[in-house]
Image (cartoon, rainbow, N blue to C red):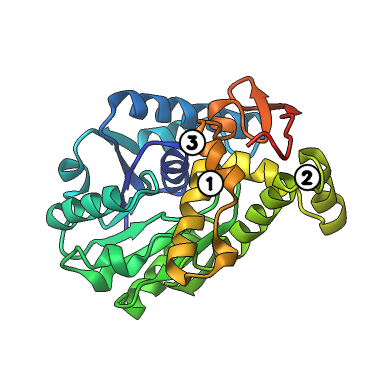
Amino acid sequence: MQKVTVIGAGTMGNGIAHVFAMNGFDVSLADISAEALEKALKTIDRNLDRMVAKELITAEAKAETLARIDTFTHIDTAVHTADLVVEAATEQLELKLSIFKQADKAAPGHAILATNTSSISITRIAGVTSRPEKVIGMHFMNPVPVMKLVEVINGYATAAEVTEQILAVSRRLGKAPVAVNDYPGFVANRILMPMINEAVIALFEGVAGVEEIDEVMKLGMAHPMGPLQLADFIGLDVCLSILRVLHDGFGQPKYAPCPLLVNMVTAGKLGVKTGEGFYQYTNNGKDRVVAANFSPNRF
């Protein structure tokens, strides 16, 4: 396995392309937006510069990494020689199904089709392809170049040898893969999102403020980041989408999104990427400034 196509040049897509290229794979990075591709290459370049400055890689290794990445605005062209396709588009079911239908038709018969989805059913996605045994989840964590975990999700029809290949490829990337099965939220988000939602409910009910809730979890539970700040980092729209998948999949009230979360997403307060969520952010989201002034009656 040498040729990898990454579909989607956003935060996750450019991170995935980065780690594959840095570990010797030939990468085709595809997105319908040429502007998004240009931005992705600049982000990768900047992140590699940081690694050079920290003496984690050499300047030569940086140049070799960038030379392994080609960009495409058409999926068909990007996947036609791929051994592995990794879809990293927005967390929307219909978009992912459309991408997988297209990639299935254009990719070689031997190619494995993987999705970076954080909650959508692998079995559902595989069902629109002619190769469900070669469809699997590769759920990378953000930021991809830093985080070690890859949640490898088996769909109902995923072949055992495909799982072994993806576990091996993940290890080649220097990651720590964990194989799980295809149920709503898998493992990571089935556990994480109810915790984040409960933190939002505690804020909504006036139990404590934003910073107080986060401090309790950081100091008392040894979490490196509080749940509300983490929600901002993930994106409140993504959190809401995953909670809806959990609620629809299990039909249990405990997964119902807090009304405050719903209203914040409706208002466009999505966290770091919009400059405001539970906190306010400056410097393109790099600096967390202050917690927003929430009142139980505000929403």
**Is 65 placed left or right of 95 in the picture?**
right
Q: Marks 2 and 1, how far apart in space?
A: 35 Å
Element type at marker 3?
helix
Depth check, front residue: 229 or 250? 250
Marked residue nearer the N-terminal end (3 or 2)? 2
Q: Marks 3 and 2, how far apart in space?
A: 21 Å
Q: Residues within 10 Å of mark 3 (few under 14, many from 20)?
A: few
The residue tagged 1 is 144
For badge 1, the amino acid type reads Val
Foreground mark, 3 or 1? 3
Q: Marks 3 and 1, how far apart in space?
A: 28 Å
For image coordinates 59% across by 34% down, the residue present is: 271
91 up-or-down from 74: above or below: below
Element type at marker 1?
loop
Q: Quadrant of residue 51?
A: top right
Marks 2 & 1, CB-CB < 8 Å contact: no
Q: In the image, residue 133 lies at what x, y percent?
A: 26, 74
Foreground mark, 2 or 1? 2
Q: Quick one: quadrant of the C terminus?
A: top right
Q: In the image, residue 178 lies at what x, y percent?
A: 53, 69
Looking at this view, name the residue that lies furthest to the bottom: 160
Residue 253's mark? none
Q: In the image, residue 60 lies at what x, y percent?
A: 50, 32
66 up-or-down from 173: above or below: above
Q: Residues within 10 Å of mark 2 (few under 14, many from 20)?
A: some
Q: Quick one: quadrant of the N terminus?
A: bottom left
Residue 206's mark? 2
For badge 2, the amino acid type reads Gly
The residue tagged 3 is 266
